[in-house]
Amino acid sequence: EAGGGGERAGGGAAFNIPPPTCHLVNPLLTDMYQISMCYAYFRSKRHLTHAVFDLFFRKNPFGGEYTIFAGLSEVISFLNAYKFTDTHIDYLKKQMPEASEEFFEYLRSLDCSQVTVHAFKEGSVVFPREPLLRVEGPIGICQLLETTLLCIVNFASLVATNAARMRLAVGPNKTLLEFGLRRSQGPDGGVSASRYSYVGGFDGTSNALAGMLFGMKVGGTHAHSFVQSFSCIEDLTSREIESPDGTGPPIDIVSIVLKYRAQLNWAHTNTGELAAFIAYAQAFPSAFLALVDTYDTLVSGIPNFILCALAMYEIGHKPLGIRLDSGDLAYLSQEARKMFRAIEERFQIPRMASSLKIVASNDIGEETLYSLNQQGHSIDTFGIGTNLVTCQDQPALGCVYKLVEFDSNPRIKLSQEIKKVSIPGKKVLFRLHGRAGFPLVDLMLTEEEIHKYGEPRAGQRLTCRHPLDPTQRVVCVPARVVRLLQKYWDKGPTCEPESIAEVRSAALRELNSLRHDHVRFLNPTPYKVSLSEHLFETMHALWKQEAPIAELS
């Protein structure tokens, strides 16, 4: 069973592949040593030798046991547009005076027409040591791709995972909005964070450019400065609001607001704030949502909103709700809902309390969301910025890109840190599902095994070995087997890129497919990533072969 991304012969079909979103993504967006290595390959006449690289990470982020793979569509855009320009070549000639003219002509001719890329479907749940991308082709071009691919996939997958964790924290029915542009690491970081937070399960963003580029829902309220700019009712340039159907005469909303203010004996509220709310309601009669903490949330902000809301209900408009941006969010949200219920009962406005939305912001992170759940709250929507887009709890995913095959021979990278030993060879991955429907283990096999014995099948007894610990092994009899790596680039794109909505849906489906203990906040259960018996033996034989023997005397 294929896990996604239909495989077609590459190169022939024409697909609508957009350019990279960021204009900085080009062949020169790489570490200089990649180009130096490429020249060394070229000079030793090894640059055209076939090689295979795996892009993977070693540890799940944020103390969790899962990661969301993101960035594949940008990878394909990068490969599709790969071309050194004359300006690039002129610059490199100055940096590498020792390199021959033939090398620069080689660079000038390079594209990705000899490269093949297998990958997980974007939005997939992935785990440590699994090749998110398997990149094959001449070692010269494959080496040059390393840094850019890591740059694209690392941040995209990190933000998507951070967002997914927050989605799991609030549950499926709360609205999550990304508010982090002003705190992000530069313009591209801001746009990327908006994009991949949506992939991870957020519902929209405050970022207008991201909304335009990716078709995401854009939302927001107003800032404290808008409220502060008003001092009194006389600051209003008009007293009227448009009629609900837009065809009748305008209606004097100020008089109605002041009528309710007198009736409720709320003359103590800040008048400038009240004027600001009236002005905002006049501007957005069908989308009035007020920021209520400029002066005092319970004493002024919420009462002033209620005065405007009562006037709008009387006129026939429906206000949206309030935003809390400071203070004890759990307590304030519950008090706000109590005030809404009291007004609903007093003025007999059906479903007022339940229909008004309470939005909360103010440096919210994953731990805050779980804390709010424990305290109890009445928040409908969370606006999350800094902790989401900067990934404060873990600012880097740590993906690496390792050579696993050269000239048809498996290669291994050893280390005194056992966790950094790489898994050699060209590998194929399968997800084994149990009878209850949940994934049990991801199994890596060599392509050689697949050619010789075929793909693993449901009902087959499969030995699954821990990559590093020979004492850890299980036998799995799967009820369903899903192939995970699919061909997305074969001398050219093999399929149309998926929309961001499709990727988001895939991510949420994948999250819901996992057992709860794998995704829980505290002490999650590690998910098994295993090797076939043959791959385990191949890896450890090569490990033994390549490891130098120390001599003691």
Image (cartoon, helix red, strand yellow):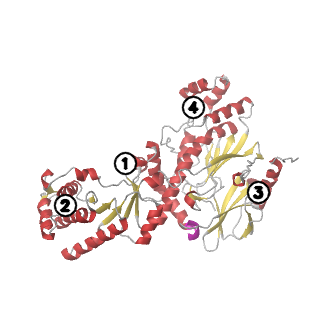
- In the displayed structure, does residue 248 sit left or right of residue 84? left
Mark 4 crowdedness (10 Å alpha carbons): few <14, some 14-19, many ≥20: some
Marks 3 and 2, the one that precedes in the sequence: 2
Q: Position of residue 299 (x, y in %)?
A: 23, 65
Q: Give the mark, 2 or 1, whose residue is nearer the N terminus.
A: 1
Mark 2 highlights which residue?
245
Residue type at the position of mark 2: Asp
The residue that disc 1 covers is 208
- Marks 2/4 in contact by CB < 8 Å: the verdict is no
Point out residue 45 in the picture as x, y percentages from the top left corner: 74, 31
Q: Is residue 140 positioned above or below 328 on the image?
A: above
Along the viewing direction, whichever of 8 and 44 lies nearer the viewer: 44
SS label for mark 2: loop
Marks 3,4: beta carbons within 8 A: no
**Residue 305 horizontal/vertical position (percent):** 23, 63
Q: Earlier in the sequence, mark 2 or mark 4?
A: 4
In the image, which residues are magenta?
513-519
* Three-letter code for the amino acid on which mark 4 is drawn: Phe
Circle 3 or circle 2, nearest the eye: 3
Circle 1 residues within 10 Å: few <14, some 14–19, many ≥20? some
Q: Amino acid at mark 3?
A: Leu
Residue position marked by numbered label 4 in the rendering: 84
